[in-house]
Image: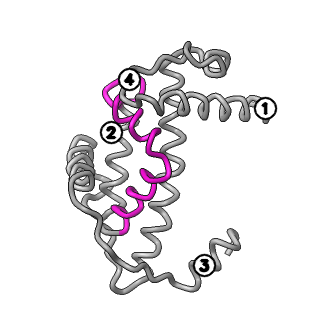
Amino acid sequence: MTWNDFHRRQHAIRAVLDHAAADPAAPLRPELVPAAAEVFADRAELLRALQHKWNRGLLGRIDVAAEDADADPRGDRVEAVGAAWRRAVEANPVLRQVLDAHAADPAIAGLVRRERGVVAVSAGLAEADEPAAELDRIGSAFLRLLDTAPPTETRRRRNPLHQLRRLMPSF
């Protein structure tokens, strides 16, 4: 993929999300968004691109949150990963709603199950070597709790080395 292709895909994704903002639960129809129709072969390819965009943002937040929780003797991975999930949703509400509406679509159903497993393991609620169905069950339950429970008010303390690592990726 060239840089031009990459930028065209990003533009198309933004156009799809802008279009979907009116009704995020509506069936995704890339043919209604000219930029998407030009870039994505079909709805399945578009859904996978949307899921990939979500995962990039979510996993970055989870990595930082888990690292912060591990560095703090009073850190709580469940709370940290939950807060990371909520921040990802706040940053991309339409994207999350579109993906929720299409979670059962065969194009992304497996990716959604893996995502829930990663969330469960990252939160320390499961071990990575557990069966995929168990990881999915635990991750699903955790995410349902996050959707229904009010966010907790905690002040995040950051390790100074963490701040340095963000500035200097090679550190």
Q: Which mark is residue 2?
A: 1
Q: Nearer the viewer, residue 18 or 88?
A: 18
- Mark 1, Cα crowd under 10 Å, few <14 / some 14-19 / many 20+, is few
Q: Which amino acid, by three-letter code, is at mark 4?
A: Ala
Residue that mark 4 sits on: 26
- Mark 2, Cα crowd under 10 Å, few <14 / some 14-19 / many 20+, is many
Please identify, in this view, whether the residue under mark 2 or under mark 4 is nearer the observer: 4
Q: Earlier in the sequence, mark 1 or mark 3?
A: 1
Bounds of the magenta segment: 80-109
Q: Residue at x 38, y 57 (%)?
A: 86
Please identify, in this view, whether the residue under mark 1 or under mark 3 is nearer the observer: 3
Residue that mark 3 sits on: 163
Q: Which amino acid, by three-letter code, is at mark 2?
A: Arg
- Where residue 5 sits, quadrant-wise, is top right
Magenta segment's dominant SS is helix
Residue that mark 2 sits on: 113
- Where residue 13 sits, quadrant-wise, is top right
Q: Helix or strand or loop: what does disc 1 sit on?
A: loop
Residue 41 lies, in percent from the top left, at 59, 15
